Image: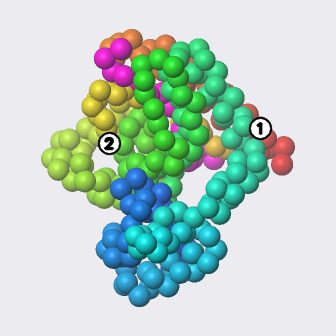
């Protein structure tokens, strides 16, 4: 066990970790309205423990319980917290300004993705384009190896986290040794080139182009991306989008790191 893993274990609070996993689960479309049994099974929790945590979250209006259907959903207070977070997270307004420019210039949906935990990512913000009909949902979660946006994040991860993502991804579990090595080489190229593309990979008929937002110590927790209909573009025609998203990500990274240095 390395130092980072040991520190995480030392300061871990199981109830808080479980509560966050529970909220995250209810944010997913598949589990957005779930019974106690469904939640407990999905998280491999003791039903009594699961009920106690749900009850506490319900008292805080973070989770809502529908007596008639006996199902739990996310609660209204999360809307308040979300709005407060948008007000206080300064970098969102900066990044959103670039997303708006990217979409205005291309007509293609652009969005911001952030890492969540060790092997997941989520859409944090979006600007939807009028062209080609692609829609994305803020709050939607993905495996960190999914899509160009995920590749841009995991390509900068440490070796332990990368191995964890590879081993925990269902699709990669079906890969042979050569396919795993090819994926690792692709991630190396992503880090080397500063961008990633996906074409009919995670979702058939959809392409993605993404670039990492790199912080002051060369780590990546966020990426920005385009998503469009692959029937409208060939891979060779993605070059202008690659240049635009890469340039925008570099400018965002530079400005965020300048603000960090000021403080």
Q: Residue at x 38, y 38 (%)?
A: 147
In the rendered image, the vertical position of residue 36 relative to residue 96, given as above or below: below
Q: Quadrant of the N terminus?
A: bottom left
User: Is residue 77 magenta-colored?
Assistant: no
Q: Residue at x 42, y 19 (%)?
A: 132
Q: Quadrant of residue 95?
A: top right
Q: Nearer the viewer, residue 62 or 157?
A: 62
Segment colored magenta: 217-232
In the rendered image, the vertical position of residue 10 relative to residue 140, given as above or below: below
Q: Quadrant of residue 252?
A: top right
Q: Earlier in the sequence, mark 2 or mark 1?
A: 2
Residue marked by disc 2: 184
* Scheme of image coloration: rainbow
Q: Give residue 185's position: percent from left, percent from top.
A: 32, 37
User: Is residue 228 magenta-colored?
Assistant: yes
Q: Is residue 172 visible?
A: yes
Q: Give residue 262's position: percent from left, percent from top.
A: 84, 43
Q: Quadrant of residue 189?
A: top left
In the rendered image, the vertical position of residue 92 relative to residue 21, given as above or below: above
Q: Give residue 210's position: percent from left, percent from top.
A: 48, 31
| Callout 2 crowding tier (Cα within 10 Å): few <14, some 14–19, many ≥20 | some
Q: Residue at x 53, y 81 (%)?
A: 55
Residue marked by disc 1: 258
């Amino acid at each position: 066990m390395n130092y980072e893993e040991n520190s995480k274990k030392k300061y871990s609070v199981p109830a808080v970790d479980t509560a966050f996993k529970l909220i995250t689960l209810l944010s997913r479309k598949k589990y957005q309205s779930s019974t106690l049994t469904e939640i407990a099974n999905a998280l491999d929790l003791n039903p009594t423990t699961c009920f106690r945590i749900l009850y506490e979250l319900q008292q805080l209006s973070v989770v809502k319980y529908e007596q008639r259907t006996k199902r739990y959903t996310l609660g209204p207070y999360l809307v308040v917290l979300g709005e407060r977070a948008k007000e206080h997270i300064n970098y969102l307004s900066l990044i959103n300004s670039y997303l708006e420019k990217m979409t205005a210039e291309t007509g293609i949906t652009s969005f911001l993705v952030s890492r969540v935990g060790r092997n997941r990512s989520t859409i944090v913000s979006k600007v939807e384009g009028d062209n080609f009909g692609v829609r994305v949902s803020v709050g939607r979660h993905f495996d960190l190896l999914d899509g160009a946006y995920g590749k841009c994040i995991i390509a900068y991860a440490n070796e332990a986290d990368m191995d964890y993502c590879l081993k925990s991804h269902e699709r990669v579990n079906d890969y042979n040794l050569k396919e795993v090595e090819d994926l690792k080489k692709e991630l190396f190229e992503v880090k080397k080139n500063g961008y990633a593309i996906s074409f009919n990979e995670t979702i058939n008929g959809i392409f993605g182009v993404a670039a990492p937002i790199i912080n002051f110590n060369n780590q990546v927790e966020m990426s920005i991306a385009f998503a469009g209909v692959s029937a409208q573009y060939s891979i060779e025609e993605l070059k202008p989008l690659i240049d635009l998203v890469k340039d925008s990500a570099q400018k965002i990274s530079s400005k965020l790191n300048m603000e960090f240095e000021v403080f």
